[in-house]
Image (tube, rainbow, N blue to C red):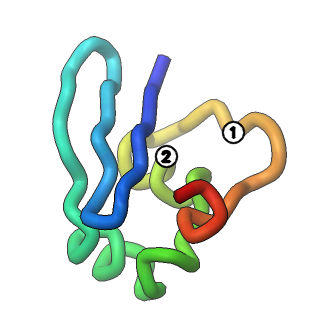
Amino acid sequence: MTTLAFDDEGVDVVYEGTEFRLERELIEEATEKTYYDVTDHEVLKIVAEQPDLQGEPRRIGDII
Protein backbone atom coordinates (compact mmCIF):
# COMPACT_ATOMS: atom_id res chain seq x y z
CA MET A 1 0.00 0.00 0.00
CA THR A 2 1.17 3.52 -0.79
CA THR A 3 0.44 6.50 1.45
CA LEU A 4 0.80 10.11 0.30
CA ALA A 5 0.83 13.17 2.59
CA PHE A 6 0.82 16.49 0.72
CA ASP A 7 2.03 19.91 1.86
CA ASP A 8 3.09 23.11 0.10
CA GLU A 9 6.69 21.94 -0.34
CA GLY A 10 6.22 18.34 -1.51
CA VAL A 11 4.85 14.92 -0.69
CA ASP A 12 5.79 12.50 2.08
CA VAL A 13 5.47 8.98 0.67
CA VAL A 14 5.33 5.54 2.26
CA TYR A 15 5.78 2.92 -0.47
CA GLU A 16 6.08 -0.76 0.40
CA GLY A 17 7.27 0.13 3.89
CA THR A 18 9.86 2.68 2.73
CA GLU A 19 9.41 6.33 3.69
CA PHE A 20 10.75 9.14 1.52
CA ARG A 21 9.94 12.64 0.33
CA LEU A 22 9.25 13.95 -3.17
CA GLU A 23 10.10 17.63 -3.33
CA ARG A 24 7.82 20.04 -5.15
CA GLU A 25 10.44 20.83 -7.83
CA LEU A 26 10.93 17.13 -8.66
CA ILE A 27 7.19 16.61 -9.09
CA GLU A 28 6.89 19.70 -11.32
CA GLU A 29 9.81 18.54 -13.46
CA ALA A 30 8.48 14.98 -13.79
CA THR A 31 4.96 16.06 -14.75
CA GLU A 32 5.78 19.31 -16.57
CA LYS A 33 2.95 20.98 -14.62
CA THR A 34 2.74 23.43 -11.76
CA TYR A 35 2.68 21.65 -8.41
CA TYR A 36 -0.90 22.61 -7.54
CA ASP A 37 -2.20 21.29 -10.90
CA VAL A 38 -0.65 17.83 -10.49
CA THR A 39 -3.07 15.11 -9.36
CA ASP A 40 -2.60 12.48 -6.69
CA HIS A 41 -2.80 9.84 -9.45
CA GLU A 42 0.13 11.45 -11.27
CA VAL A 43 2.20 11.35 -8.07
CA LEU A 44 1.33 7.67 -7.62
CA LYS A 45 2.55 7.02 -11.17
CA ILE A 46 5.90 8.60 -10.25
CA VAL A 47 6.21 6.32 -7.23
CA ALA A 48 4.97 2.97 -8.58
CA GLU A 49 5.19 1.32 -12.00
CA GLN A 50 1.63 -0.01 -11.85
CA PRO A 51 -0.20 1.96 -9.16
CA ASP A 52 -3.66 0.99 -7.94
CA LEU A 53 -5.57 4.10 -9.05
CA GLN A 54 -8.91 4.17 -7.30
CA GLY A 55 -11.47 6.95 -7.32
CA GLU A 56 -11.29 10.24 -9.15
CA PRO A 57 -7.92 12.02 -9.42
CA ARG A 58 -7.63 15.06 -7.15
CA ARG A 59 -5.44 18.10 -7.76
CA ILE A 60 -2.84 18.82 -5.10
CA GLY A 61 -4.23 22.39 -4.98
CA ASP A 62 -7.60 20.96 -3.90
CA ILE A 63 -6.06 18.57 -1.37
CA ILE A 64 -4.05 21.17 0.52
Q: Earlier in the sequence, mark 2 or mark 1?
A: 2
Vertical order, 20 against 8 (above or below): above
Q: Are marks 2 and 1 in contact (CB under 8 Å)?
A: yes
Q: Amino acid at mark 1?
A: Leu
Reply above or below: 52 against 58: above
Does residue 63 appear to the left or right of 26 in the view shown?
right
Which residue does the image show at 60% across and 55% down from the upper left? 63
Residue 45 percent coordinates (x, y): 49, 51
Is disc 1 surrounded by few (<14), some (14 to 19) or many (20+) residues within 10 Å? Answer: few
User: Which residue reaches farthest right?
Assistant: 56
The image quadrant that residue 13 belongs to is top left
Is 13 located above or below residue 59 in the figure? Answer: above
For the point 44% across and 86% down, which residue is it? Answer: 34
**In the image, residue 40 lies at what x, y percent?**
57, 53
Q: Looking at numbered disc 2 in the image, what kind of residue is underneath it?
A: Leu
Q: Residues within 10 Å of mark 2 (few under 14, many from 20)?
A: some
Image location of residue 44, percent across then percent down: 49, 46
Kind of element beneath mark 2: helix
Q: Which mark is residue 53?
A: 1
What residue is shown with label 2?
44
